Image (cartoon, rainbow, N blue to C red):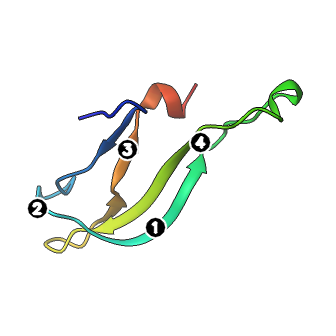
Amino acid sequence: MLNSKGISKVKYCRICGYSPLKGFLELGPLPTPNGFLTKKDLKKPEPVYPLTIGRCINCGLVQLTEIVRPDIMFS
């Protein structure tokens, strides 16, 4: 389910469906990758999104624990 900022919390492992994921690395709020700003936008606040990495205890897959909508990430 998406929140108002376009972020959805990953509740199940993408490979085996196990829940919950065990978060182990929180890099904090970061701007979108490839979100290059124009010169006129440099002084405006830039939107940031959480970047937390988790591991599935069942199968060991390392994955993001929050997903940002594709239209935000790749626009």
**The quarter of the displayed image where residue 3 is located:** top left
Element at label 4: loop
Residue drawn at point x = 47 percent, y = 25 percent:
71
Q: CA distance from mark 1 to mark 2?
A: 21 Å
Task: Please report whichever mark, 4 or 1, sits nearer to the chain's N-terminal start.
Answer: 1
Query: Is 40 rendered above or below residue 18?
Result: above
Given this view, does label 4 or label 2 mark the residue nearer the observer?
4
Q: Which mark is residue 18?
A: 2
Screen quadrant of the C terminus: top right
Q: Residues within 10 Å of mark 1 (few under 14, many from 20)?
A: few
Q: Are marks 4 and 2 in contact (CB under 8 Å)?
A: no
> Marks 4 and 2, Cα distance to the nearest angstrom?
28 Å
Whole-angstrom CA distance, mark 3 to mark 2, is: 17 Å
Residue drawn at x 23%, y 35% is 1
Q: Amino acid at mark 2?
A: Tyr
The kind of residue on which mark 3 rests is Ile
Residue 62's disc is none
Question: Residue 70 sits in which quadrant?
Answer: top left
* Mark with earlier residue (4, 2): 2
Q: Residue at x 22, y 65 (%)?
A: 21
Point out residue 34 in the picture as x, y percentages from the top left corner: 66, 39
* Numbered mark located on residue 26 in the image: 1
